[in-house]
Image (tube, helix red, strand yellow):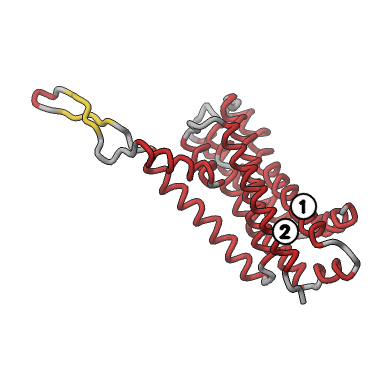
Amino acid sequence: MNRLLIANFMRIKKNKLFWALCGVMALVSLTMVVNLIANNATQIDGAANIFVIPAEIAAAIFISVFFGTEYGDGTIRNKLIAGHDRRQIYFANAIMSTVCAFAMFVSYILPVMIFGFSFVGLPTVKTIGNVAVGIVTLFAFCSIFTMVSMIYSNKTGATVINIVIAFLLLLAALILTSYLTIPEFYPSYGMGESMSYVRNPNYVSGIKRTVLQILVDLLPSGHSIQFIMGVSRPLWALSLYAVGVCTACSIVGAVVFSKKDIK
């Protein structure tokens, strides 16, 4: 597997798309920091907490195009002809995906640290924890995108599918989270402007709330939304969910790839 990893990273070193996406990540981060500075913000937390969303989209594009090119150029076939095991090929590519995604995270976080910490303020301990778990969440996204790209050999098709998955997961997380943020009580003003609290009929409780929360925790995009809106779940629990997604997608992807007919 070492030779496969070395070959992959040699290609990454010369890959213009990878460096362009790292540059875009840095630009997005810098734009957010400048906006906070312009608005006299005193906390950098908002810019730090949101990094998973642009990073997942960048990862979806890069992973799809990179592996699609491997299929198109016959690189995958040549690796098999050279005697490499399919599982080694898959997991070497999976490792490469996570390393590249981490590089995109670094590209994003550097402007936050260099300019944000200096002109806005230091992050809270909770935000530091969110960022740490967010990296694991980003790896979960990578496992999904790698699975799709290694199973579906068409570069354009895999790119479209992964980008659609990224946005659909975000949409699903937003919809599910919206139900969980409905307040249980809301203020009601009666005669003489006296205020009382009335139970909200749209509030979700009981088993329905438990199921919704599990779904939000299970979706990597659910983590992204919770980081922005305020995480109410233990960070270790979100990490376990992310590791579970990584494991499940890696196993499914490796099994299907091992049986795939590669021409």
Earlier in the chain: of badge 1 and badge 2, it is 1
Quick one: quadrant of the C terminus?
bottom right
> How many C-alpha atoms fall within 10 Å of the one at disc 1: few (<14), some, or many (≥20)?
many
Residue at 90%, 56% (x, y): give it.
Answer: 3
Residue 254 is tagged as: 2
Could you say which is closer to the camera, residue 10 or residue 164?
A: 164
Q: Position of residue 192 (x, y in %)?
A: 9, 23
Q: Is residue 15 left or right of residue 249?
A: right
Q: Are marks 1 and 2 in contact (CB under 8 Å)?
A: no
Q: Position of residue 9 (x, y in %)?
A: 83, 54
Residue at 8%, 26% (x, y): give it.
Answer: 191
Location of residue 92 by image quarter: bottom right
Residue at 30%, 32% (x, y): give it.
Answer: 184
CA separation, marks 1 and 2?
15 Å
Q: Compared with residue 1, is residue 52 higher up or lower down, i.e. above or below? A: above
Q: Position of residue 82 (x, y in %)?
A: 91, 67
Number of callouts in the render?
Answer: 2
Q: What residue type is disc 2 on?
A: Ala
What secondary structure is found at the residue carrying circle 1? helix
Q: Position of residue 161 (x, y in %)?
A: 58, 64
Q: Compared with residue 77, is residue 59 higher up or lower down, i.e. above or below? A: above
Q: Is residue 228 left or right of residue 62?
A: left
Q: Which residue is mark 1?
A: 96
Q: Compared with residue 261, is residue 171 higher up or lower down, i.e. above or below? A: above
